[in-house]
Amino acid sequence: MKTFGEGEKFFVINHETNTIYNDVVEFDKSRLDQAIKSYNGFPKDDATLLVRGIDGQFLLKKGDK
């Protein structure tokens, strides 16, 4: 919440399978469709989240826990 709580934004967070790398991509609230497209662009085996920044709610999640 402290990290993602600024304004009304969406974040796509991805952890690549078998690596130490994480990607965090930020989207304005008016670009939810692009955030979903970004989320869907990551492999299904990667741990990927779509987070609403204002309250930290997970909107979508896939991959390893």
Image (spheres, rainbow, N blue to C red):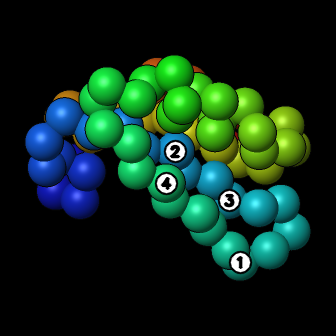
Give the residue number, with chain letter if any, for mark 1. 20
Give the residue number, with chain letter if any, for mark 4. 25
Identity of the amino acid at label 4? Answer: Val
The image shows residue 50 at horizontal and vertical percentages of: 50, 34
Give the residue number, with chain letter if any, for mark 3. 15
From mark 4 to mark 1, how far is it between C-alphas? Answer: 17 Å
- Residue 57 vertical placement versus 1 (above, below): above
Residue found at x 83% / y 60%: 17
- Residue 27 vertical placement versus 32 (above, below): below
- Residue 32 vertical placement versus 24 (above, below): above
Q: How crowded is mark 3: few (under 14 residues within 10 Å), some or many (20 or more)?
A: some
From mark 2 to mark 1, how far is it between C-alphas? Answer: 17 Å
The image shows residue 36 at horizontal and vertical percentages of: 58, 27
Mark positioned earlier in the residue sequence (4 or 3): 3
Q: What element carries label 2?
A: strand
Mark positioned earlier in the residue sequence (2 or 1): 2
Q: Residues within 10 Å of mark 1 (few under 14, many from 20)?
A: few
Residue found at x 52% / y 44%: 12
Q: Nearer the viewer, residue 31 or 52?
A: 31
Q: What element carries label 3?
A: strand
Nearer mark to the viewer, of 2 and 1: 2
Residue 64 in sight: no
Q: Are marks 4 and 2 in contact (CB under 8 Å)?
A: yes
Give the residue number, with chain letter if any, for mark 2. 12
